[in-house]
Image (cartoon, grey):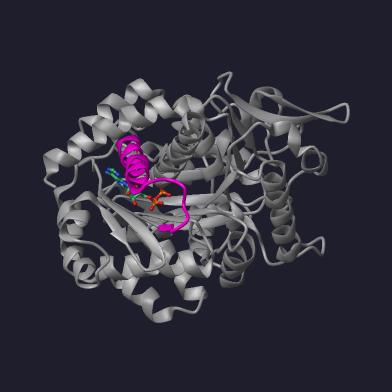
Amino acid sequence: MDIQEWEQLHTDAFYDVKRALPYLEGMFVAYNSNIDAIKHLTKEDLSRFIGFFNEAEIQARVETYPREVKEPLDFMARLLISMREGKAAEIPTYTSDTHVWLKEHLGFDYARMGGQAGIISNLLTQIGLKKVVAYIPWLSEEQADYFVDSDNLLHPKVEDGKVVLKPPRQAFKPGLESKVNWIFEYSKELEITCGGNKFKVPRDNRLIISSRPKWIRLDMDREIYEHLDSLFPIDGAMLSGYQMIKERYEDGTTYKDYVSHSVNAIEKLKALNPELRIHVELTSIQNRVIRKAILTEIVAKNVHSLGLDTVEVANALNVLGHEELSYSVIRKEETGITSLYQGAVQLLKDLSLERVHVHCLGFYICVLSKDHPLTLKEHRDALLFSSTLASTKALKGKIENLEDVAAGLEVPVSSKGIEDLENFKVYCVGKKLCTPEDFEHGYLYGPDHDAVLVPTKVVDKPTVTVGIGDTISAGAFAAMLAKMKQTQVEE
Ligand code: ADP
């Protein structure tokens, strides 16, 4: 198929999914959200900032290379190191004092919703799902303000021993601190003088102070778990944030506790609606013990669908014992797409999934179990719908409603994406996964799985790049569920 035909398919899929979305009753989205506070540093900000400290003390702290922000001086030192090298860095802080201090002394230019569940809840609300039930165990008053204020977005709240659904602004837990990640951006050529040293920033980059309050637990409040039926009717759940689980906590609990609670919550959701589909959105998980536990204990056998990018496919394969395949996914050589496809198939099998959706720049691969209820055309429509959402997000920085998405339809399909897929055709036809004609449509038929491959729309100069992966996975999963519901109703 040529680019023009793929453009047309995107448009047709968009309107088709738009008609199907009202068939969905609701979606449950948990667990992680935070606030991203963004500050672009000017020369004036920096000299004011340096002025808060003794310059000799800053230099001395730079020498110690602090690995966490315990006090403002640690932050100042790491900022200078990051700027001197023009190198991106992310350092944790375990207290909210840093946030309070930065807010008082520096302030931010703007703040936005961060965290996968936060981003996904807002997106699904704005594309008009009938009901989105978000659940953030650490929903603070400040955090609640970053949720879209709309009737179709609700959050459970315990009131007089009962669980009721309320808008997030009425469902927060009073007195909770907020999880705020600070993103300090700086530009090339900025001149810095500190403690007699002078340097120029070599390239644009950023320093992130990521907030990891010690009391945060990836868990569900007991009362909400006991009354999960209050969230229904829902057709699906999108779960994320498991990367926040730590191996050990100061109170003696370990990751095993939170993994088993997570599994219990999934089992209960499925018991309440056996038709319910569960999607897990993965992100980088540095700790291999945690990464393996999430994959083999939470995802395997319990969930239906997994969303991830190339790096995460490689990381997942690595802990599941497929080192060689993992390296060839990450090396991204000419055979990269073949390895990526094989990797996705491996994940589908190892984790007993129904669906694995891998998003790359320019194309998506979705591997499916043979018994999946939808046709490959319907799956393809779900992917194309999400490609249009992603291009809207990259173009405009936000999606406020489905009307906004008309702008995304104008973004061209990536010719590089089409070319990358074309290079994969010889392998697929050679392995008898498809005929050349099937491949043109993006359909593969493996011995124990099927797959859909689509080229996607790519924005040349994106306004934002954060949260696009979450947008893709959420859009495609919601679209797929909507098509399933529509088919059931119309049968
Ligand atoms: P994040 O978690 O920040 O969203 P990911 O790596 O998970 O990052 O997802 C990024 C995805 O967003 C890419 O795989 C690609 O599909 C999509 N994407 C990135 N840039 C663009 C762009 N300019 N236009 C369209 N899609 C994009």
Residue ID at (14%, 47%): 1
- Splitting the image into 4 quarters, where does residue 14 fall? top left
Foreground of the two, 183 or 223: 223
Horizontal side of 127 relative to 458 (left or right) equals right
Q: Considering only vertical position in the picture, is 456 above or below 310? A: above
Residue 297 in the image, given as x and y percentages of width and height: 64, 65
Query: Which residue is nearer to you in this view: 158 or 349?
Result: 349
Query: Whole-percent x and y of residue 125?
Result: 51, 27
Q: Main secondary structure of the magenta part?
A: helix
Q: Decide whether residue 214 is among the magenta residues.
A: no
Residue 374 counted in the magenta span = yes
Q: Name the residue located 19 percent from the left edge and 59 percent from the top edge.
A: 420
Residue extending furthest top?
A: 151
Determine the residue located farthest toward the right in the rendered image.
Answer: 160
Query: Is residue 167 left or right of 207 when viewed as pictured?
Result: right
Residue 414 in view, yes or no: yes
Residue at 14% x, 56% y: name it: 419
Depth check: 196 or 183 in front?
183
Q: Position of residue 85 (x, y in %)?
A: 34, 61
- In the image, the segment drawn in magenta is 368-389
Q: Is residue 409 shown left or right of residue 321?
A: left
Please determine whether, in this image, residue 266 is positioned above or below residue 175: below
- On the question of residue 55 being in view, the answer is no
Which image quadrant for residue 9? top left
Indicate the quadrant where residue 97 lies: top right
Indicate the position of residue 90 as horizontal and vertical percent values. Answer: 48, 56
